[in-house]
Image: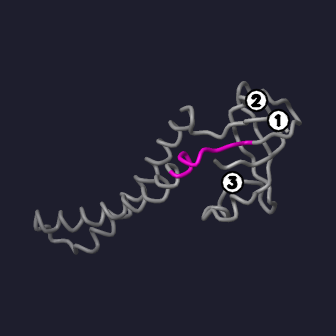
Amino acid sequence: MIEEQGTVIDIKGNIAYIKTEKGTSCESCVSRETCHGTIGTNEVIIEAENVANAKFGDRVVVMVGTATLLKASFILYLGPIAGLIIGVVLGQIIVKQFAVNLNPDLLSGVLGALFLVIAFFGIRIYGKSLEKREGFRPVVVRVV
């Protein structure tokens, strides 16, 4: 489990918005530079389930499950690579099977790029559906 501390800056229903600084768990993350936060600062806004019933201004501990983080990383990093490889291989197969008078490398490159873009859109759609599922979003576990 990964835990971070932060301050509640907004509450909407059962969702708390917590401002936190990039902490020790962020230092080893490969996405630390692209993580959405306030530009030019070390601050990050986290959207979390408010199971601890925190109020505006409370200092809280936010937790993310390790399994959730691993699943998300697996999908986020391997999905586009798989899309690219599938597109490239499909391009080679199409040229060989149908004897199309195209450069196989050109068709592979175009299909690889197309499948890469499709993979990114697929990940975005899948990510939106995961946001609504319990267990895939950070949780406010306690008020400090």
Q: Amino acid at mark 2?
A: Ala
Q: Name the residue nearer the viewer: 140 or 14.
A: 140
What is the secondary structure assignment of the residue under circle 2?
A: loop
Q: Residue at the spot x=36%, y=57% of the render?
A: 115
**Residue hosting label 1:** 143
**Residue hosting label 3:** 36
Q: Mark 3 or mark 2: which comes first in sequence?
A: 3
Circle on res. 52: 2
Circle on res. 124: none
Q: Amino acid at mark 3?
A: His
Q: Mark 1 or mark 2: which comes first in sequence?
A: 2
Q: Residue at the spot x=29%, y=73% of the render?
A: 106
Separation (CA) of disc 3 from disc 2: 25 Å
Q: Is residue 66 magenta?
A: yes
> In this picture, which residue range is highlighted in magenta?
62-70
In the image, taking residue 39 as reference, residue 70 lies left or right, namely left
Q: Residue at the spot x=79%, y=47% of the render?
A: 5
In front: mark 1 or mark 3? 1
Q: Position of residue 77 (x, y in %)?
A: 48, 59
Quadrant of res 85: bottom left
Q: Residues within 10 Å of mark 1 (few under 14, many from 20)?
A: some
In the image, taking residue 94 as reference, residue 9 lies left or right, namely right
In the image, taking residue 75 as reference, residue 9 lies left or right, namely right
